[in-house]
Image: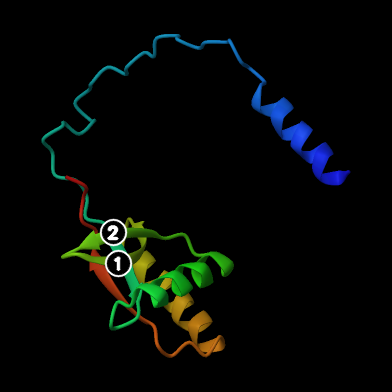
Amino acid sequence: MRKVAMAIAVLALAGCGEGKSVDAPRVKPAVTESQPQAGAIAAQEWDVRVGPPDHKLQAITDLTAWLLEHGFNFYIVKTDGKDEVLLGPFATKEQAEAKQAQLTEKLARAKKNDTESQIIEHKAAQ
């Protein structure tokens, strides 16, 4: 009975707002001298690369599950045909180092000695 009630609630909420269209034009802020231009160099950002040294697929899925379980936000990128798990991006290297220290501490408590972490420069999407 509980599952049926939950399914009905989900379906009812999914239909909320159906037929309503919000097409209000968005006002773009005027460009001023203090705002960076499109060609301006972006500030340097940092990531923490996390993973097993041998990039095993199963180990990466276990790692991402562990990261989620312990409250770490991550994303996955493909570099040279291999998946990499990254935490970040962080605005400063100090923030990345603090997150790496927190990760290292939690990995040590969990006795996960097969996982490495390294601070790298954030690569912008192209």
User: SS for tag 1?
Assistant: strand
User: SS for tag 2?
Assistant: strand
Q: Is residue 76 left or right of residue 42?
A: right
* Above or below, 92 relative to 103: above
As shown in the figure, which amino acid type bears the numbered disc 1?
Answer: Glu
* Above or below, 86 relative to 105: above
* Above or below, 3 relative to 87: above
Residue sitting farthest toward the right: 1
Please give the residue where the numbered disc 2 appears in the rendered image.
77
The number of numbered badges drawn on the structure is: 2
| Residue 66 place in picture, x, y as percent | 52, 72
Between 40 and 61, the residue placed more toward the observer is 61
Q: Residue at x 20, y 34 (%)?
A: 36
Q: Is residue 28 left or right of residue 21?
A: left
Q: Residue at x 58, y 10 (%)?
A: 19
| Residue 95 place in picture, x, y as percent | 38, 65
Between 91 and 22, the residue placed more toward the observer is 22
As shown in the figure, which amino acid type bears the numbered disc 2?
Answer: Val
Please give the residue where the numbered disc 1 appears in the rendered image.
84
Q: Is residue 12 left or right of residue 62?
A: right
| Residue 28 place in picture, x, y as percent | 32, 17
Q: Are marks 2 and 1 in contact (CB under 8 Å)?
A: yes
